[in-house]
Image: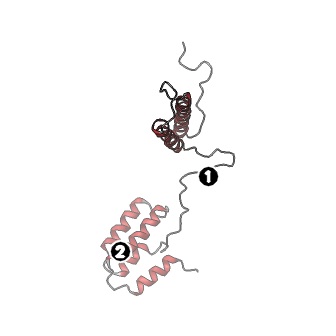
Amino acid sequence: MVAGLGDEMAAGLAGRGRMRASNADREQAIDTLKAAFVQGRLAKDEFDLRVGQAFASRTYGELSAATADLPAEPTAAPPPTAMPARADGDQPVLRPGRVIMVATALYAGVWPFTFLVPWPTNSEGEAPGAIVALFVSTTLIYMFVLVTAVGYMIAGSHQKRSGGRPPRRLAPGAGGQQ
């Protein structure tokens, strides 16, 4: 017969059976019981009974009785996966916030250039039309980038909320129409 890890722990504890167990020993035994409960090796009522027994035990012999038929080392569970890996054909997640930040920084840089740089004036003291054209064109480009980025943000939030599934369609004739 092959000895398991629980047998080794029980044998080690039983060898010191009459020695008093420490709080750390009881906590280690309770950790073993918790792992066994999570793995489905113990039912809830049996787990509660054995935990009570572990807390009440004063010697290693009493403590080993609570965990004698369990493995001492919990088996490793696979780590949970937070997000599924992206498939090869999927598009990467767009980050419109960064696009808005860069566009705003560039647009904010045009303002001082447009209004603070001394431009040559014509004979009537008016600024040339190139300054006005620069200001209007950068404003239009900025507004286009801003609207596009906000549209991507809205579409991304809808996709995130739906889990990437297309919207459900009602069957013909089903829709509350009388």
**57 over 81 or under it: above or below:** below
Residue appearing at x 54%, y 37% in the figure: 149
Which quadrant: the N terminus? bottom right
Contact (CB < 8 A) between labels 1 and 2?
no
**26 over 15 or under it: above or below:** above
Which residue in the structure is indicated by mark 2?
26
Where disc 1 sits, the SS reads: loop
Estimate the spatial distance between the alpha carbons at disc 1 and disc 2, rounded to whole Å: 42 Å
Quadrant of res 81: bottom right
Disc on the earlier residue, 1 or 2: 2
For discs 1 and 2, the disc positioned in front in the rendered view:
1
109 to the left or right of 58: right
Residue appearing at x 49%, y 64% in the figure: 41
Where disc 2 sits, the SS reads: helix
Q: Residues within 10 Å of mark 2 (few under 14, many from 20)?
A: many
Tally the numbered discs. 2
Residue appearing at x 39%, y 74% in the figure: 28
Position in image of residue 116 (x %, y %): 45, 38
Near-viewer residue (127 or 125): 125
* Residue type indicated by callout 1: Ala
**158 over 37 or under it: above or below:** above
Position in image of residue 154 (x %, y %): 52, 35
* Residue type indicated by callout 2: Arg
Position in image of residue 171 (x %, y %): 61, 23
Position in image of residue 82 (x %, y %): 53, 53
Near-viewer residue (150 or 51): 150
Q: Residues within 10 Å of mark 1 (few under 14, many from 20)?
A: few
Which residue in the structure is indicated by mark 1?
85
Near-viewer residue (23 or 11): 23
**4 over 104 or under it: above or below:** below
